[in-house]
Image (spheres, grey):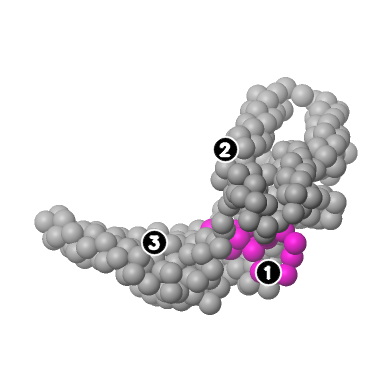
Amino acid sequence: MSARFTERDLERWVERGLLSAEQREAILEELTTRPPDEGLSVVMLLYYGGGLLVLLAYGIFLGFQWEEMNEAGRVVISAISLGFFTAISTFLIRNQRFRVPGELLQVVAIAAVPLLAFAVLDAVGLWPEEPRFRASFQAREAYQADLAWARMGIAGVTLLAAWAAFSFSKSPYALVAGVLSVAWLVLDVSFQIQVERVQFEWETPQWIVLAILGAGAIAAGVLVSGKTEREYSLWLYALGLAGLAIGLGVQAFDTDAWTWGALWLAVALVIVALSVPLQQRLFAAAGLAGVFVYMARLVFDVFETAGAALAFVVLGMMVLAAGAIYQRFSERLYQRGGET
């Protein structure tokens, strides 16, 4: 239960003898020194917005200036960026009250690592050179293999940086960066073992790998739920659901094979079922959304224009019914009201 209290509540509890005056002062002192909650408060929205703007501005700057720099300039600007954001994020993290903005800037520092790795590889001549237009099939295939190795190296370095950042701060944002680095690395491994590939293009194996990684992230969230001081499971759940939705969604919605659609619906229903033992309303919302979105796709495939309108009326009524059922039974199914 996520109940909140105010200073007036503390005063009332002191008057009723539930707390001593010393306990009241100790509670107030603790509240002033701890970082803000990681929920969507105004302060957290400002922190998230500021961190996103810093990352966006950094990306825009490099986007405009990257091609204008020589190899040495790229190495220098990437190294300076990494050092600057690492230093300022470390300083803020050590100041407990400003831990959250420090952790967000730590992600910006991690984002500078692949840029620095690429700049160094390019400067020393280890980055693969793209073959000419009339290059042979073997030359293009060799280029894609070398490029996959280079990307795997960058992903590995980024993963090490994210792991070092997480070891220092125990930040869920650094954990997210690490999980994305793992996904990047594994996907490049799938490219490397794929034969006769002459261009960088995601195909069915990559989408399947992404869905498997999503399922793995959900499993990791289940394993760490309630076992860590900070809440990591919700972040892993969100990443896992996104991986499943993207990996399976491309196959279910962009192909006509009914097997992918059936798999999509089966996974969506499993996600809904998992919401009860895991006490996660997020799973119920994501699973039901997956079911209704695919049903909407079937409406367009099966019915003509007039029939589609009627089918959407039925679908809308089903959504309303799902909402009514949720309202009726949610408190019984999700007894820990603080969960999302």
Percent x, y for residue 186?
A: 69, 62
Q: Residue 158 versus residue 208: which sits nearer the camera? A: 158
Q: Earlier in the sequence, mark 2 or mark 1?
A: 2
Question: What is the CA distance from the residue labelled 1 to the residue labelled 3?
Answer: 27 Å
Q: Is residue 137 above or below residue 228?
A: above
Local secondary structure at mark 1: loop
Q: Where is mark 3, residue-wise?
A: 289
Q: Residue 209 versus residue 139: which sits nearer the camera? A: 209
The three-letter code of the residue at mark 1 reads Gly
Percent x, y for residue 211?
A: 56, 66
Q: Which mark is residue 42?
A: 2
Percent x, y for residue 75?
A: 84, 32
Q: Is residue 251 visible?
A: no
Percent x, y for residue 258?
A: 35, 72
Question: What is the CA distance from the residue labelled 2 to the residue labelled 1?
Answer: 26 Å
Local secondary structure at mark 2: helix
The three-letter code of the residue at mark 3 reads Ala
Rendered residue at 56%/56% (across/down): 3
Local secondary structure at mark 3: helix
Question: What is the CA distance from the residue labelled 3 to the residue labelled 2?
Answer: 28 Å
